[in-house]
Image (spheres, coloured by chain):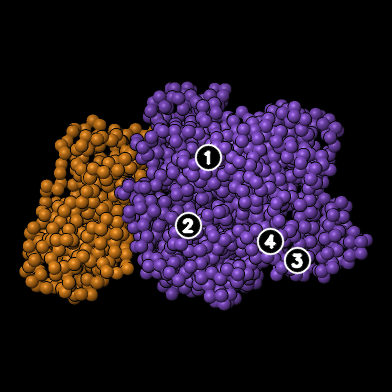
Chain colours: A purple, B orange
Amino acid sequence: MSDKTIKKVLLLGSGALKIGEAGEFDYSGSQALKAMKEEGIETILINPNIATVQTSDGFADHIYFLPVTPFFVEKVIEKERPDGILLAFGGQTALNCGVALYESGVLEKYNVRVLGTPVRAIMDTEDRELFVRKLDEIGVKTIKSEAVSNVDDALRAARELGYPVIVRAAYALGGLGSGFCDNEEELVALTEKALSFSPQVLVEKSLKGWKEVEYEVVRDRFDNCITVCNMENFDPLGIHTGESIVVAPSQTLSNEDYHYLRKLAIKIIRHVGIVGECNVQYAFDPQSMDYRVIEVNARLSRSSALASKATGYPLAFVAAKLGLGYGLFDLKNSVTKETSAFFEPALDYIVVKIPRWDLGKFHGVRKEIGSSMKSVGEVMAIGRTFEEAIQKGLRMIGQGMHGFVGNRELKINDIDHALSEPTDKRIFVIAKAMKSGYTVDKIHELTKIDKWFLYKLQHLIDTEAELEAFDEIEKVPAPLLRTAKEQGFSDFQIARAVLDNFGGSAEMANKRVRQYRKSLGIVPVVKQIDTLAAEYPAQTNYLYLTYNGSENDVHYLHDHRSIVVLGSGAYRIGSSVEFDWCSVNALMTVKKEGWRSVMINYNPETVSTDYDMCDRLYFDELTFERVMDILDLEQPHGAILSVGGQIPNNLATRLDDEGVNILGTTARSIDNAEDRHKFSAMLDNLGIDQPRWRELTSFDDIREFIDEVGFPVLVRPSYVLSGAAMNVCSNDDELERFLRLAANVSKQHPVVVTEFIQNAKEIEMDAVAANGEIKAYAISEHIEFAGVHSGDATIQFPPQKLYVETMRRIKKISAQIAKALNITGPFNIQYLAKNNDIKVIECNLRASRSFPFVSKVLKINFIDLATKAMLGLNIEKPEKNAFDLDYVGIKASQFSFSRLQGADPVLGVDMSSTGEVGCIGVDTSEAIMKSMLSVGYRVPKKGILLSTGSARQKTDMLDAAHQLHNKGYVLYATGGTHQFLADNGIPAIRVYWPSQPEMQPQALQMLHDKEIDLVVNIPKNLSTTELSNGYKIRRAAIDLNIPLLTNARLASAFIRAFTTLSLNDIEIKPWDEY
Amino acid sequence: MRETRRATLILEDGTTFEGKSFGYEASTSGEVVFNTAMTGYPESLTDPSYEGQILVTTYPILGNYGVPPRREKDDVSEFYESDHIHAKAIIAQDYSWEHSHWQADRSLSQWLCEEKIPGIYGIDTRALTKHLREKGSMLGKIIIEGCEDVDFYNPNLENLVGKTSCKEVEIHGDGEKTVVLVDCGTKHNIIRCLTRRGVKVVRVPWDYDFTQIPYDGLFISNGPGNPDMAEATVANIRKAFEIGKPICGICMGNQLLAKAAGAKTYKLKYGHRSHNQPVRRVGTETCYVTSQNHGYAVDSSTLDKDWEPLFINMNDGTNEGIRHKSKPYFSAQFHPEASSGPKDTEFLFDEFIALL
């Protein structure tokens, strides 16, 4: 039934991971590519996100690591001449780019057909006014809003609708620039901001407190429609669906409600003319059947990825096939392989999605959650009771919580306020309120969360109280213990409830619970997700564990032929798609080498949790308890802990204690590298240098140590009261303030103080070793000096500016460490280098963030090698090395500050980027251009604002300032910088800080007036005073969507690139041609 | 922890499942069947097609939105599918003791107690469903702790159509055209779907000789059990063929129409009971997601040459409806009236009305 004239297809990816657009698009793009491949269609992919699975060998035929912008996409189209283009698989980025190409006539010019939903239909759903009109045609109610393009019209519209109103930017990702306004003042501020992202802003009446329900709908070109899944938000309307806890299927809708909304969804998708997949979001009155359609996403979305994982229905795969002209009746259900893909999954479990926030990583960010998205990742928990699923999920988010109860007590001054003005801690505030005696009714009144959810949460509080009545684990009666496990209590939670202070040791207490419950036969069972609630047998092993059942769905052979790979959990700052790539590659090698591949992971945005990537997928927790449950059932040959980031790594010692066969580097070695004291002692023994550090317990000791090493120092408290976990202190004052206000120094809470070496280079060593011998390695250098977190730094590979001597010494030291720790598998060492003086900063005996980057640039798959090494296979040293490459790779970081209202967009020792790209070029400048454009920078056209920090940084930036001036840019500069430029013969216009409001012109005003389209603002150091000085400028740049650079070395590199290279000079070359 | 009585499900092959009681505390027995719908327990429980059956819901959490009030509107139940619960018992993994919905006026547990129907939870319904899938639907009994044992009971040996049908002729709605609805255990939504379209519905008992009264169209309802038990209805349908007025049937109605046309029916291994059965209109590229609840099916290969399949099931290829090649007679094995389930095929009522 498909269209056989389509031979070559271009797929647009979504670029770097950012808040609102994350790993889900790697998953959907990968599925679409698989679908094309199955049809024998040649595929071209544009995606600069080098850490993704879709940009790996075997997914697309040709991969371009280029920005997903109309300019570059047109160039690729011109070169490749595809027959068709897929716009629905790369999030809003791809969709917006596709619409632009359509409108500018590029698609028509090159005769490229849009597969699936027509662009006209996309535009009808994206433009609010068109959308409302379109749905009015069929009498479907939308949230009445008025599209305005200036602040005055916004004020008038709000007066007509009545406050509170919500403001949204049209064509924006995940509610960017959106928010609620209770009065005119708030409206003016928000409208101004939203208008900077989008020419059109919508003002609409707020329906706070209504339920929020979504349907995922599929339609083929024969007008056959299905709704694959519906989902209900735990949090009522007013909280962005990406910020909300979500359950699937809906729990509080009656049959009449469910099918009323389902029918509407189908009516809408037919009228709009979607071919493929779309998502319909509703606001639903909790007291009647009144509804409003919030929006329709005419593309794969975060929700569709979630729905795919929640049901086992491969939405993206099917949508891609429908785009080729297939009917749903042509396709098979990929789980049963027997029944039709035209059906609606029946679930026999409940799924709970919980967002993961990392707001603690940012200075100044507002913790309230609302109509725009701030979360950086999510987890999906599966259970057969709501209680079980939500408790699993709250552990999975990995922020030190053990479930709904059994956590460290939250300090909350005003519970009522905390309930009605939700923050990232909202669910735990509910626990606190319940314990403080708040009734379900009262909490409902304050939160508008449906009482059904609250009753269920109340059960958990009740069960905990029942457990607390006992003082010995073994005295807890079996029925109560079983009930607790059915409600998702972990052994830890039970131990904490029963014992005072765990009877001394938490670990021992956990073991006691485990032993006791096993003796009572209280163990979890494994269930399959099969799309049809057991009506037909499933041919796939998509699994979860539950205590609500008596029988396993899997028949275990216990032949020790499986290898269990532990995944990386929720995406968060510091751990994201790169570890998914590592996990997927490890699984592929395991399988290729003839073992049964088994995955444990719980992140719905990943490819590793696609049930066709491995032989058995356990969509479940990565806690010690759950991993042991699975290993007890699987009895594998061994487990791989080194490809999923820090979560699996942290389990090494405890799993080793239980006799688990950890493949590769031993748990003992891992501990020796992770434990600061042991590692340091080892380096001393080997005669390897490291920055001086000490663990200290009093102020006096700290001062004494600083007398020895001098300021600045890096301070890492073990107990943090608020704010960032580490800080650089440049003087006594700052040290005092940080340690007194934000942290705590005592015998119980020691502080690690490390000398901070300024103007040093930071170098990464990514390598694979077998039995202590390095088999493959990649050395890369940071563009920025040390002090910018390695996850935020711009990284160049192969290095272009390192001394050969430095490289040789790094290689030698790495070999010594590999030998000393007898490493087998992947590892990463970070170095500082200053004048060939090499110091080790840290060592991780696992794959690092840069593994996919170096693997793809070097075209040697480090994870494949590492996995083989861990399987005990002989691996040859690859012939090729970095010196052979006649091109350069640059990995640049993506920041999401625009999403994080109030956050200071400055880089420091704590990581704050949410994603990255990696681009390849003939030299540093070309690679830097591609990668910076890929993370959202634009080549300025008009003016540039410079305030370039300390004398040293000003000097560093001088060349760049000359280049800008020579290129004809108008330069604006603040006081000191202005003087410095004048002294060096560079003309600039002086502008004033917000702290001098009487002076003109004001820097802020210039930004608002759009006179400036690049801001270089470099703080002298990371002290609070210095930071607060430029904060308003930096924040305004972010809020007004003006590119901002805060690092002198990166700014220089970027300026050099765009002043010496024009866009048209950039080579359009796929990865396979390098 | 809530104190509840133990409840044991014993299947005729000896398999037992231990659970807890949340409904009326008395032992019971019937045919154990599973339904994979995720919503609609008030509709299912009152659906006469579940007469004599113990209903297993594969969706694990039950009772979330309580039960809507017992209220009549235009002489039929407003929210239910008949005036009482027909299922013998209901089984789920987890029961929601607290419910939340603006329309609910009591909990499922309260309702079951009022109607003396047992409900049990805490049973591995997935394991139970797989068992039924592998072995086929089978008889079972529920023994509540402290209550007397009961015998197995096979509802298919009884004339359930006769048991659930109305006993007297009833008139519903008003309109120029008259539709005779043969009540084989009809769901109220069939009546609602017809009267909403402006016709007068004359609802007659299953064995009533409706050919004696004037009508513009004949509708044969859904109903429970084995179609072989409703020979009287089949005989009347044959007479209706002589009259030649439009005929439509649903579920049992499809089976009886097929039998009248000379075809045979057979019992499916475990039936179709769900909201997600895919059917295709024969000879077209048009497919529908349908609501189904049947244990028997029409054997298409035994259809007379004047008849042809109208719909087929896309999962297992079974018959989902038939039509006469030249006369205005057609029927669907699924439930276009839904309630519960998707409403995608409600247009069949329009097609029927258009024929009158």
In this orientation, does residue A345 appear?
A: no
Which image quarter: residue A262? bottom left
Measured along the vertical axis of the image, is residue A271 above or below residue A789? below
Which amino acid lies under the numbered mark 3 shown in the image of this protein? Leu
Q: Earlier in the sequence, mark 2 or mark 4?
A: 2
Quarter in which the N terminus of chain A is drawn: bottom left
| Rendered residue at 34%/36% (across/down) | A551
Measured along the vertical axis of the image, is residue B151 above or below residue B174? above
Which amino acid lies under the numbered mark 4 shown in the image of this protein? Lys
The residue tagged 2 is: A34
Q: Classify residue A36 as left or right of residue A984.
A: left
| Rendered residue at 40%/30% (across/down) | A522
Marks 2/4: CA–CA distance: 27 Å
Closer to the camera: disc 1 or disc 2? 2
To the question of a shared chain for discs 2 and 3, the answer is yes
To the question of a shared chain for discs 3 and 4, the answer is yes
On what subunit does the disc labeled 3 rest?
Answer: A
Q: Classify residue A233 as left or right of residue B331.
A: right
Q: How many marks?
A: 4
Q: Nearer the viewer, residue A870 or A139?
A: A870
Q: Earlier in the sequence, mark 3 or mark 4?
A: 4
| Rendered residue at 38%/44% (across/down) | A528
Which image quarter: residue A989? bottom right
Report the disc number at residue A566: 1
Quarter in which the C terminus of chain A is drawn: bottom right
SS at mark 2? helix
Report the disc number at residue A930: 4
Marks 3/4: CA–CA distance: 11 Å
The residue tagged 3 is: A1061
Closer to the camera: disc 3 or disc 1? 3
Task: Provide residue A51's location: percent of width, then percent of height.
Answer: 60, 52
Marks 4/1: CA–CA distance: 34 Å
